[in-house]
Amino acid sequence: MKILLADDDNSLRKVLLFKLRQKGFDVIGVEDGQKALDELKRAQYDLLLSDIRMPKLDGIELLEQSRVIQPELKTILLTAHASVPQAVAAVKLGAFDYITKPFEDDVLFIAIEKALRINRLEDENKQLKGKLKAQNYISNFVGISKPFKEMLKLVDKIADTDTTVLISGESGTGKEVIAKSIHYKSHRSDKEFIAVNCAAIPKELIESELFGHVKGAFTGAVRDKKGKFELADGGTLFLDEIGDLNIELQAKLLRAIQERIIEPVGSEHNKAIDIRLLAATNVNLKKKVSEGKFREDLYYRLNVIPIHVPSLTERKDDVPILVKEFVTKFGKESEITVSTKLLDSLMHYSWPGNVRELENLIERMVILRKSNELTEKDLPDDFGVDDTPSSKVEESNDKSPESYLSFHDAEKKLVIDTLNRFAWNRTKTAKFLQIPRHVLIYRMKKYDIYYNKKEK
């Protein structure tokens, strides 16, 4: 426990410092309110012991300004009889307690112990709330498969540290869920969790988004703006899709990670930041390094603790459990069952969209269900149960290439051929294929079918 003592009475300050250190407290002493304020800006403290009457900045002003810098800091005021009414008023402003001079040692130590005990209870309460939040975030992220259980063990092991973590995995596997779980299981759980999708922010704005900017830094910068690093100060910053960060900005990110300082756009002054950094990617960063598209030094700074979030294909044993969880979640009070045939179909699907795709599918089926038993008939028309790249058409006497197309490739070819037939008019194509237009658009996105000319 760290204590800051502010008193302009040199003799009293030295005596108190000696007695507090004898009791085992880590205590720093300063002779006026301004120096105390500067110290609070420099380091975190658990308790402030402050005289009321001091030069430069009195105890009341110090109390008010300290609550801005360290809102949860407990303050005990030391006051003469003449300023007791002022001390009482200060308690109403947020001071924890006050002690009148002269005082017995026991009176001071009892007040200090009481303040520190409240601190401990508040910390325990925050940790409990953090664990509950972490549990809520990961409540639908369940499983019994070996890869899944091993990943959760690693999350528990590294959560309450400040180590940088690189989370890898396909889209839809739940990388942000894992990041939030790490944050809320840590000692930073009462601070901010700030998430940034590096792929979603335009290249020209990403530096300002991360590091902030000052007024006049560029056209449109009409006021100072804090970046995500500063907003996450004391908490956790999660950089999703880190592989899409442009190479020029990677150097600035590396400096921020190494030195824990940032420089807002247009500013000549650095700002110190205290964050826990988590990053995520759905691409092979090592390959990007070898291609010269990602800095090697930044990769190793991020990859201190690697966590791989397994795809649903890697954890097929978890599909029945996840189905049950999502049915309960979206069915609420209803007693909904799932047919064996439907579950078997879901088990054999390739799940390119991973857990997110499964969750969306179950939500859709539960809402549109015809009865309280979900069957294969409840599957939407655009769901490809047999969508596995390895599935092959049975070999026949016809040796043309089409005979060996997978279902996946055959459907893609049919869509492209029909689009070409109708000059890429999606309305006419959908009508010819006898499917709704939105299903055609879904399949075009699914197979990455694009046309660069305006639709006719």
Image: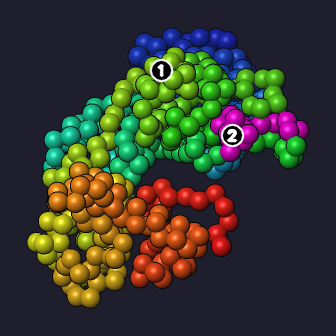
Residue 99's disc number:
none
Q: Looking at the picture, does residue 106 appear above or below residue 309?
A: above
| Residue denoted by label 2 | 203
Q: Looking at the picture, does residue 342 appear above or below residue 250?
A: below
Q: Amino acid at mark 1?
A: Ser
Q: Does the image show residue 5?
A: no
Taking the image as shown, residue 293 lies to the left or right of residue 392, namely: right
Q: Residue at x 32, y 36 (%)?
A: 308
Mark 1 Cα-neighbour bin, 10 Å: few <14, some 14–19, many ≥20? few
Q: Nearer the viewer, residue 243 or 37?
A: 243
Where is the N terminus found, in terms of image quarters? top left
The stretch of residues the image draws in magenta is 202-218
Q: Position of residue 83 (x, y in %)?
A: 71, 38
Mark 2 Cα-neighbour bin, 10 Å: few <14, some 14–19, many ≥20? some
Label 2 and label 1: CA atoms lie apart by 22 Å
Q: Nearer the viewer, residue 402 or 191?
A: 402
Pointer 2 and pointer 1: residues touching (CB < 8 Å)? no
Q: Nearer the viewer, residue 333 or 16?
A: 333
Residue 290's disc number:
1
Where is the C terminus found, in terms of image quarters? bottom right
**Quadrant in the rendering for residue 332:** bottom left
Q: Looking at the picture, does residue 188 appear above or below residue 327?
A: above
Q: Position of residue 139 (x, y in %)?
A: 29, 56
Does the magenta portion include 210? yes
Q: Nearer the viewer, residue 300 or 189?
A: 300
Q: Looking at the picture, does residue 24 appear above or below residue 237?
A: above
Q: Residue at x 60, y 48 (%)?
A: 200
**Quadrant in the rendering for residue 344:** bottom left
Q: Position of residue 211 (x, y in %)?
A: 68, 34
Question: Mark 2: which secondary structure?
Answer: helix
**Quadrant in the rendering for residue 194:** top right
